[in-house]
Amino acid sequence: MKSTMTRRELLKTSTALAGAAAVGRAGASPNEKVHVAVLGSGRGRTLARWFATLPESELVAVCDVDETRGNQLCAHIEELTGKRPPLVVDFRKLLDDKNVDALGVATPDHWHAPATIMACQAGKDVYVEKPCSHNVSEGRLAVQAARKYKRIVQHGTNLRAAPHYQEAWALLRKGVIGKVMMVKAINNQRRRPQPIRDDEAVPAGVHYDLWLGPGPKRPFNRNRFHGTWHWTWDFGTGDLGNDGVHQVDIGRWALGLKAPKAVSCSGAKLGSKGDAQETPDTMVVTWEYDDLLYVFEQRDFTPYRMPGHRQDNDNIFYGDEGYMIVDRDGYSVFYKDEVKGPAYYKKWVDTEGHYKNFIDCVKSRKSENLIADIEEGHYSSLLCHLGNAAYRTGRRLEFDAKKEQFVGDAEANGLLTREYRKGFELPRV
């Protein structure tokens, strides 16, 4: 599908809206509902349900380039609330819609940062799914856009809403396991292999050129469309950026870590050997800090939990006096000879907390109250991008945290950005 809005028209619209002094709808009151439009009907289905049912928000549009799937979500919301939101194909039409206060961006990864940046310029607040970017440079640009245009931007690392993490971090700060020397984030999944498929005609109702957006022109193939795009470098970030980013975020959050000084990675396709997946299903990434090693382990072929662990995915903090295991349901501290220390357990499911926090901050305009501000999301996404770059180059890479560039490695630095397709270039901030 050819874009219905030219680049020049889009920039004019964004510039005009960014210069407006009003926040959200003209004259919007903190007592009014926040009007949210959700982009994408995969993970976006969850966002749409929350924003449609929270008392302080209203779902005013569903946006999807696949009209069939978009209409299915619209029908689902109608069953849920009695009100059917309209379907919009091109999210850029929402940028100058004064009835829209915020966007929930749940597109494929390659659209996360561009949509966030454009929304900020248009005066919209944003809930953007993880990872917040497809590469490091556009992630930093998303942070700059949020700051420049004074937008509320929440990152979709929703595990942060589980109540026990803050308690666990307080124990770490008090020295419950002594000095933390190493952190391990574990991501165990059971991913099915992707059979090799031939390219085919674009299905009816799918606006594929818009789906490709800033990514390279590729023929339609179901191995790089709904869900399967995760395992392609052009559009996804592998399971490190897909699900692993949750565990990466938890360990980084606990200790206030930002960018590392170096990264290395060993990875392979083991469970997916010979299939269409481009990204590795097995990885060990090490980020080096001044006095700490942060390790990520990924195994996408394991139908079992780690021995002694409640969850498939969790974090382990190793101190010089003991260690702490933390997952989404609680934490446990252990000392020498498996002597047990403080512990907490309560089964946690995704609640309204993370989404309500976003809506509350939109209404209050207090970005400092966000559970996962965009810059927090950027640093967690950055670690994932650095791990992928180390895997793809096959070498240890030194990183300049201030410049957010690799030191003396042109090939690796080429992976910190991308070439944007004509008509879908990143706007200037």
Image (cartoon, helix red, strand yellow):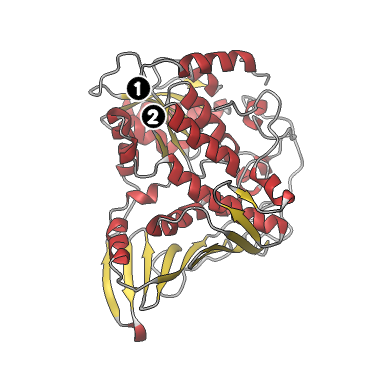
For the image shown, how many numbered marks are present on the structure? Answer: 2
Point 41% across, 64% down: residue? 311
How packed is label 2: few (under 14 Cα within 10 Å), some, or many (20 or more)?
Answer: many
Q: Which residue carries the number 1 mark?
A: 83
Q: Quadrant of the N terminus?
A: top right
Instruction: Determine which quarter of the picture holds residue 298.
Output: bottom right
Q: Which residue carries the number 2 mark?
A: 77
How packed is label 1: few (under 14 Cα within 10 Å), some, or many (20 or more)?
Answer: some
Point 51% across, 28% down: residue? 70
Give x and y (percent) for residue 314: 43, 63
| Disc 2, SS | helix
Please name whichever residue, 368 or 156, is drawn nearer the observer in this view of the structure. 368
Look at the picture and state if 154 lies above or below 102. below
Give x and y (percent) for residue 347: 30, 59
Q: Amino acid at mark 1?
A: Lys
| Disc 1, SS | loop
Point 34% across, 44% down: residue? 371
Query: Do we see residue 110 in this rendering?
Result: yes
Please name whichever residue, 248 or 365, is drawn nearer the observer in this view of the structure. 365
Instruction: Determine which quarter of the picture holds residue 326.
Output: bottom left
Point 68% across, 19% down: residue? 2
Give x and y (percent) for residue 295: 52, 65
Q: As drawn, is 379 to the left or to the right of 202? A: left
Alpha carbon distance from label 2 to label 1: 7 Å
Give x and y (percent) for residue 134: 59, 42
Q: Quadrant of the C terminus?
A: top right
Q: Earlier in the sequence, mark 2 or mark 1?
A: 2
